[in-house]
Image (spheres, helix red, strand yellow):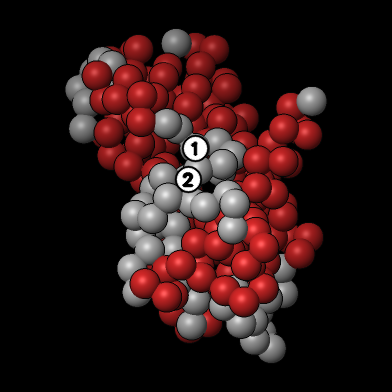
Amino acid sequence: MKTTFKTLSIAAALAASLGLAGCAANAGSGSSTPMDHGSHGAMSSSMPSAGADHNQADIMFAQMMIPHHSQAVDMSDIILAKSDVPAEVTALATKIKGAQAPEIEQMTGWLSGWGAPNAMSDHSGHGMSGMVDDAGIDKLKSATATEAAKLFLQQMIGHHEGAIDMAQQEIGAGKSPEAVKLGHDIVDAQQAEITQMKQLLATL
């Protein structure tokens, strides 16, 4: 059941991101526009065109993964700003930030080159698997020391699982060799980090 729910969430987000892309292209600024889950009928006319080196799956992958990665960087910044957090956890947060920030720049460059809007950069992530809601982020901000470390690990495990789901969608449907390679890289790196985080949780 969990896999079915996550797959449906991803499918909904993929569809909705297409609607957003069209809105953003028309308005010139879609960074804070809520996702319209009822716009599916207009998708064919509003989708940015794919080229010889990429397709719609590549565009949606980048548009969704940018805010997903951005939240992971934000969460890492939150934990790194705290005192008395176990060194292993701060080291992991530093590693996550160091890996995902450059990938955000890479994907932003792809979208620019493809003529597609960076339509989902508002971090809202409606329907995106693994995203932490505002209440969860506030709880992370207010937590201290070991409790903050535990919460960060718990949230980031789910966050990574969501990223892996989206990366696997790209691997299966993408056309851009660079984007598909990034999908593989995300799956490999974040699965290893999930294992590490579960081990760290057991020690706290």
Asked if 29 appears above or below 121 in the picture, the reply is: below
For the residues bearing labels 2 and 1, Cβ distance under 8 angstroms: yes
The image quadrant of residue 198 is top right
The residue wearing badge 2 is 125
Q: Is residue 146 left or right of residue 131?
A: left
Mark 2, residues whose alpha carbon is within 10 Å: few (<14), some, or many (≥20)?
Answer: many
**Residue drawn at point x = 58 percent, y = 49 percent:** 37
The residue wearing badge 1 is 131
Asked if 34 appears above or below 181 in the picture, the reply is: above
Q: Position of residue 181 (x, y in %)?
A: 66, 66
* Quarter that holds the N terminus: top right
Which of 4 and 156 lies nearest the eye of the viewer? Answer: 4
**Residue 136 visible in the shown view:** yes
Q: Amino acid at mark 2?
A: Gly
Q: Is residue 157 left or right of residue 7?
A: left
Which of 39 and 200 lies nearest the eye of the viewer? Answer: 39
Secondary element under disc 1, as helix, strand or loop, is loop
Q: Position of residue 119 (x, y in %)?
A: 44, 63
Asked if 185 appears above or below 176 in the picture, the reply is: above
Which of 85 and 64 lies nearest the eye of the viewer? Answer: 64
Which residue is at the far bottom?
52
**Residue 140 visible in the shown view:** no
